[in-house]
Amino acid sequence: MIRHAQARKGEIKRVKKATIAKRIVFGLFGTTALTSFILFALDAYSANQAALRSTVQTNSTITDNAALTNETALHTKDENLSIGTSERHMLFQAQDASPSQTETAGLSVPEQTTPANEPQTQSDIASDSRQNTSDLSAKPNDSKSENASDHKKKQKSGKKSRQFCTVTEDYFSDALFIGDSRTVGMLQSHLLSNASYYAKTGIGIGDILSERIVNEGGRMISVRDALHLHSFNKVYIMIGINDIASGDSDWFTQQYQDILDTIRQTQPKAVIYIQGNIPMSYGTQDFGGSLNNHNLSLRNEASRTLADKKSVFYLDIDKIYADENGNLQSCYTTDGLHVMPDYYTLWVDYLLHHAIVC
């Protein structure tokens, strides 16, 4: 009995030892597996961090280069002056230009057009008479005759329209630019050096005709007087931002109409271009006052109504530099009001592709 009990105790001890040994083996196996998994995860994490550091370093280099480029652009010498200053810039006018000199040299000339108010010639009258006779004699169900008549009417109507076309820089040899500091900037860019300029920094729409800003042989005269002395076939105008706080849209429209009337009286053959005022940057505006792009856009739209598309045309210069909200984009300016000299090329390129050739 005692031996049997001792044998049973010995058997229990062996079972316990075997169980402990199994637990130790399984524990070692689990620890090894867990350690391998942790090492694998650490390796993967280290590789990911290395790739991330490489990407961050590359982006940092690109950002630094971009920042350096922007800083260089912002420090580009800007020869334009602030709106509203009294310093005078002037002002060159070319010699009298013959209308035939630029209409045939280096231009893309479209088909000859007939002005809307031009009297009919005898051949036109005869042609119309023949057409009317043909129409009277035609049967009501003669669709071929009706189609031919409609086609001729469309052709005749198309000849009266004047479309923008592309020209070369020779087109501006008999052109005049009238305006404020934005136009002064065009003069200083030397991109259209063969054109003439009547412009002054800080001048407003109410003074542009009367103030003496044109140097005529060492004597300063007004734009109105200068227009009586010289001939131009194209006149470009950008004016109005300096007195944006003066009057309302009706007053502005009347002032602009006076300018157009004076040009038409002194330059009867000229094509006149009204250029939309370049907007201000977002941070430059006074949203509680008058100096803001909303007020400026109202005046631009008022001047647009004065374009008859026969001899007076409106050009959307303001759209060239504006963002989706109508503000001057910061990449084009350093002061929020003027375009940097390097970006006048966009203005000139627009003019080259929006010209009227008589």
Image (cartoon, helix red, strand yellow):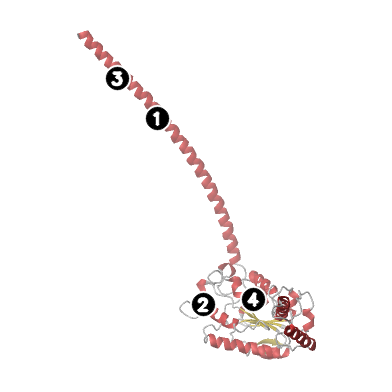
Q: Residues within 10 Å of mark 4 (few under 14, many from 20)?
A: many
Q: Position of residue 179 (x, y in %)?
A: 63, 82
Q: Position of residue 332 (x, y in %)?
A: 59, 69
Q: Which residue is mark 4?
A: 185
Which label number is shown at residue 294?
2
The Cα atoms of the two marked residues, 2 and 1, are separated by 73 Å
Residue 42 shows in the view = yes
At label 2, which amino acid type do we have? His
Disc 2 vs disc 1: Cβ atoms closer than 8 Å? Answer: no
The Cα atoms of the two marked residues, 1 and 4, are separated by 78 Å
Residue at 58% over, 55% down = 62
The Cα atoms of the two marked residues, 2 and 4, are separated by 24 Å
Which structural element holds mark 1? helix
Q: Which residue is mark 1?
A: 31
Q: Which residue is mark 3?
A: 16
First of labels 2, 1 by sequence position: 1
